[in-house]
Image (spheres, rainbow, N blue to C red):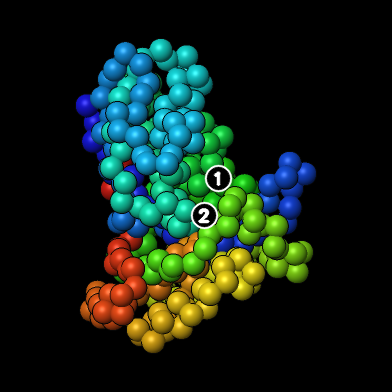
Amino acid sequence: MLRLKAFAKLNLVLEVLGSRSDGYHDISSIMQAISMHDVLTLQLADRIELKHRLPGVEDRDNLALRAAQTLGDATGCKRGVAIELEKHIPSGAGLGGGSSDAAAVLRGLNILWRLGLTADKLAAIGAGLGSDVPFLIYGGTCLVEGRGERITPLADLEQTWFVLLRPRVPVPSGKTAALYSLLKPAHYSDGDFSSTVRRQLESGAERRPQALFNVFERVLPAAFPGLDRYIEDFHRAGASEVHLAGSGPVLFTMLNNDKQASDIHAHLLAHQLESYIVTSVGRQEIGC
């Protein structure tokens, strides 16, 4: 039996470079694993099954279950597994919760089923489940390119604090596809934002929140009406830089010390806003 943490992620940078002939988009992103996590328990069984189902989520839509089935199909392994899933990452928030569960299942079953697959092979299998899964196989800090399948591990970010704010705004059906549909060629970039942050990380330079970037912030009013009020709340709480987490609608601010993070977090909670304080997670904590 294995008990695994499935860590959430943030996009410190998310650029869209252009559209692809397969209907997807080429991206350049700096992704970071964070301490918020789901917990998965995997135990050998006669078949692949979820022991506890999530309210309102059909089995066919559960990425943890699909990951086990996909891995079995890809390797020809006929062993089973019973999956228990304890959710803590908010769903549909832009934090990669479902993808993180899938990545943890792939990593865990590689051990439990004694498959001996490399991280690269697991990531290739995971790419068919979701664009964030390959990164979440590796964790830590990575440059992510292509449609999410090309991963370049970077040096771990020095301990950093993030405060998250989950706004109460409507989330459109098919959120990620809806966001991409709002983008125009004028919103595309050339990878310079990612290159700048990568250079800062590799040189050990001071972390600069103002260097962070998310292309979807350019279409926020159309994507999430009412989100601007929460951004203002975040600024009033003391955050100098506020960014969208992935495809949102969760917002985050990056901080270099726990005191400032705690003060902002406390201010948000005092105003009845759903908020979390998390830290960066290094690759060694993932345990691929």
Q: Residue 64's quadrant in the figure?
A: top left
Q: Residues within 10 Å of mark 1 (few under 14, many from 20)?
A: some
Provide residue 115's location: percent of width, then percent of height.
38, 21
Which of the two marks, 1 or 2, is nearer to us in this view? 1
Answer above or below: position of 236 versus 86.
below
* Residue in the picture at 52% in, 54% down: 143
**Circle 1 SS class:** loop
Provide residue 40's location: percent of width, then percent of height.
29, 38
Identified by mark 2, the residue type is: Leu
- Classify the position of the N terminus by image quarter: top left
**Circle 2 SS class:** strand
Answer above or below: position of 122 versus 37.
above
* Residue in the picture at 32% in, 69% down: 275
45 and 61: which one is in front?
Answer: 61
Q: Residue 155's quadrant in the figure?
A: bottom left
Does residue 199 show up?
no
Identified by mark 1, the residue type is: Ser
Q: Residue 18's quadrant in the figure?
A: bottom right
Provide residue 63's location: percent of width, then percent of height.
45, 36
- Classify the position of the C terminus by image quarter: top left
* Residue in the picture at 63% in, 48% down: 146
Answer above or below: position of 274 versus 146.
below
Residue 143 — which label?
2
Q: Residues within 10 Å of mark 2 (few under 14, many from 20)?
A: many
Give the labeled residue for mark 1. Answer: 131
Provide residue 150's location: percent of width, then percent of height.
57, 45
